[in-house]
Image (cartoon, helix red, strand yellow):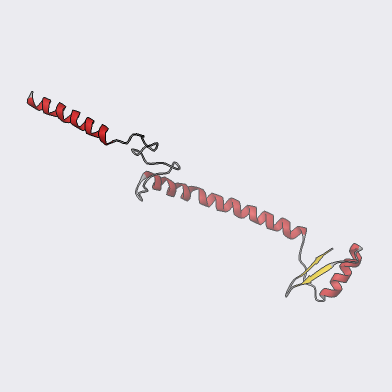
Amino acid sequence: MLLGRLVRQGASVASRSSSLCSPAVPSLRRGFAAQVTSPRPLSMRGDGLMAQCIVAALVYFVPQDVVFLGGLFYLWHSTAVSAAPKVKQLDAESAVEEWKTKKGLEMVKVVKGRNTWYVTS
């Protein structure tokens, strides 16, 4: 019985002291929980389930993606090469003049690089 009175008296003293020390305007920010900016794990263990699932997904999906993307890039490359094949010209100036007469152009801009010439009309 004596212990109960002491606990009750201690609780009433603690509640009075906390009300006396509290500011008149309560703060708007709650301080009991961390602010979460995105749903991400707080810690990442190397032997945890998430790490094992990531490794398994990489092992399963990466080879499939490499095969698919390799075929897709080869298709894009072969389409581009067949659309505009490059031909080595021994005399670039005569090749440009021949191209101009074939297309019926007179005013073209020629940019001469070290190995490649670019012609725009």
Using the rendered view, name the quadrant where residue 77 is placed.
bottom right
Q: Residue furthest left?
A: 2
Q: Quadrant of the N terminus?
A: top left
Image side of residue 12 versus residue 114, left or right: left
Q: Nearer the viewer, residue 85 or 25?
A: 25
- Which residue is at a point 63% across and 53% down the rendered structure image? 71
Q: Nearer the viewer, residue 88 or 31?
A: 31
- Which residue is at a point 75% across and 59% down the rendered structure image? 82
Q: Quadrant of the C terminus?
A: bottom right
Image side of residue 6 versus residue 59, left or right: left
Q: Residue furthest top?
A: 1
Residue 40 screen position, x and y as percent: 43, 43
- Does 10 sit above or below residue 45? above
Residue 107 screen position, x and y as percent: 89, 66
Image side of residue 13 versus residue 38, left or right: left
Residue 29 screen position, x and y as percent: 39, 38
- Which residue is at a point 84% across and 74% down the rendered structure image? 93
